């Protein structure tokens, strides 16, 4: 009988117990991925992979160690367990290490409600090739596009199962379908490029290849003739496609790992207003058909909707068991882990309150300023929130887009920036991070 992620996870626990571990948890992941890339109307690259990987964490007293492998033979499982136990004996003591208590564990979840796996079969490579070719052709058909750098289509399916010696055992399957396209306009030093893509858990939700290619081409042509804007201070509008980066900056700052280290610009802000009144940032781990959904975290705790920021006020940290114990708090069921690492805090899906204005309304409102559609690099001081990023997009004058810009830098302080943000109403509800375009009142712009 072929081993499944569930049987492998339990076999690892048995091996760990025989090797002398006091406690252990095991993660097994099996998956298939298929990727097709085309160029100039023909197949450029085709890749398919499948395999199973396993990870084991053993605990000896207050010490732990993690090991992983892609070989699932019984002798490999035994060697992994023995190696992990030997490593744990040499590890430093940590009083916050430990599995969840049995009464904390998730039970009786309904995985079907999350609807994370497409019930269809793996797509034929020819179907993916056709989709990629359609995206490329649609981009090429846009007047002004000189070439298509890449057009691709892909599919993935992964099943993961987590088991632990405290009695927890649970798993789920997730699929994904995607199409993307990158186009170029101009030539030589005057070349500009842009992109568009879509990724969904269910193939039936995926946007058409023609639409994806057409949007990629249109976005690219709009960037023709980009130049540096003048240095100064101005309002900045983060386009919906990159506005989520500001939300991720918040999430990094409220992570229990950052708070424990004291390396967070929000470390003293609990209970304070960090966003304008009326705006909330909600974690939604049980949202159907979302890529970050999960019925339980990587320590087997049940997930639930929670407000990270409510009505503008920061309400709490993102915690796993270890960081919660360090801070004298309760886990928020936000543990995530890789095959070769212990759990760490991580969020699932999040959504920021949308506004009532469209992106065009905010462009008109800003008068003169910068619309950012792309970000390059990052310089963010984790302790102070000082922010500086390379940007490209469009210069706005008299409430209208005037010309494309590139090679500029925007700077400010995240605490000041976030207290003034004004959201549009254009967030895409299917994304894991649901965030509309965001207008920031004033930032420093370094250009020509």
Image (cartoon, grey):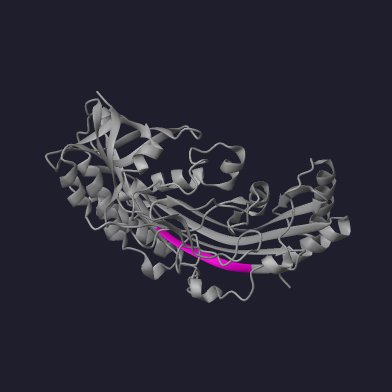
Q: 339 and 351: which one is in front? A: 351
Give the vertical position of 62 relative to 296 (above or below): above
Residue 416 location (% of width, % of height): 36, 38
Going by the image, does 86 lie left or right of 256? right
Q: 5 and 307: which one is in front? A: 307
Going by the image, does 233 lie left or right of 203? left
Give the vertical position of 320 relative to 377 (above or below): below
Q: Of all residues shown, which one is farthest toward the front?
A: 271
Going by the image, does 400 lie left or right of 427? left
Give the vertical position of 425 relative to 413 (above or below): below
Residue 387 location (% of width, % of height): 40, 33
Is 177 covered by the magenta stretch?
yes
Residue 37 location (% of width, % of height): 41, 51
Residue located 59% across and 68% down the image? 172
Is 223 covered by the magenta stretch?
no
Dominant SS in magenta = strand
Which residues are the magenta region? Answer: 171-178
Q: Of all residues shown, which one is farthest toward the top?
A: 448
Q: Of all residues shown, which one is farthest toward the left?
A: 398
Give the vertical position of 273 relative to 126 (above or below): above
Q: Quadrant of the C terminus?
A: top left
Occupied quadrant, residue 192 = top left
Residue located 11% across and 39% down the image? 398
Q: Quadrant of the N terminus?
A: bottom right
Residue 138 location (% of width, % of height): 25, 55
Residue 315 visible in this rendered orientation of the protein:
yes
Residue 3 visible in this rendered orientation of the protein:
no
Label total for image: 0
Occupied quadrant, residue 439 = top left
């Amino acid at each position: 009988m072929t081993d499944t992620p569930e049987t492998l996870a339990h076999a690892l626990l048995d091996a760990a117990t025989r090797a002398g571990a006091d406690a252990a948890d095991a993660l097994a992941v099996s998956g298939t991925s298929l990727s097709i890339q085309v160029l100039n109307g023909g197949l450029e690259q085709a890749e398919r992979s499948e395999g199973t990987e396993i990870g084991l964490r053993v605990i000896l007293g207050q010490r732990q160690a993690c090991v992983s492998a892609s070989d699932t033979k019984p002798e490999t499982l035994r060697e992994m367990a023995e190696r992990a136990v030997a490593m744990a004996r040499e590890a430093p003591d940590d009083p916050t290490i430990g599995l969840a208590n049995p009464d904390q564990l998730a039970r009786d979840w309904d995985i079907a409600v999350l609807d994370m796996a497409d019930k269809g079969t793996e797509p034929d490579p020819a179907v993916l090739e056709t989709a990629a070719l359609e995206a490329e052709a649609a981009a090429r058909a846009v007047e002004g596009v000189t070439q298509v750098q890449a057009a691709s289509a892909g599919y993935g399916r992964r099943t993961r199962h987590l088991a632990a010696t405290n009695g927890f055992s649970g798993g789920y399957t997730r699929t994904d379908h995607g199409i993307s396209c990158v186009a170029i306009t101009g030539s030589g030093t005057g070349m500009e490029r842009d992109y568009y893509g879509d990724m969904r858990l269910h193939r039936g939700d995926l946007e058409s290849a023609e639409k994806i290619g057409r949007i990629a081409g249109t976005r690219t042509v709009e960037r023709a003739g980009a130049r540096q804007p003048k240095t100064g201070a101005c309002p900045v509008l983060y386009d919906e496609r990159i506005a989520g980066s500001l939300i991720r900056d918040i999430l990094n700052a409220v992570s229990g790992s950052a708070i424990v280290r004291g390396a967070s610009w929000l470390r003293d802000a609990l209970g304070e207003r960090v966003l304008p009144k009326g705006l909330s940032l909600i974690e939604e781990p049980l949202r159907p058909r979302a890529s970050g959904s999960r019925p339980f975290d990587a320590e087997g705790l049940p997930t639930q909707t929670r407000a990270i920021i409510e009505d503008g006020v920061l309400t709490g940290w993102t915690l796993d068991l270890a960081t919660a114990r360090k801070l004298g708090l309760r886990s928020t069921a936000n543990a995530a882990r890789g095959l070769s690492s212990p759990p760490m805090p991580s969020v699932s899906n999040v959504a920021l309150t949308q506004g009532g204005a469209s992106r065009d309304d905010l462009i008109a409102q800003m008068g003169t300023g910068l619309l950012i559609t792309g970000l390059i690099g990052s310089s963010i001081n984790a302790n102070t929130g000082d922010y500086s990023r390379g940007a490209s997009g469009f210069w706005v004058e008299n409430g209208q887009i005037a010309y494309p810009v590139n090679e500029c830098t925007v700077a400010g302080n995240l605490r000041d920036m976030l207290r003034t943000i004004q959201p549009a109403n254009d967030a895409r509800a299917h994304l894991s991070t649901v965030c509309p375009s965001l207008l920031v009142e004033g930032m420093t712009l370094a250009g020509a």
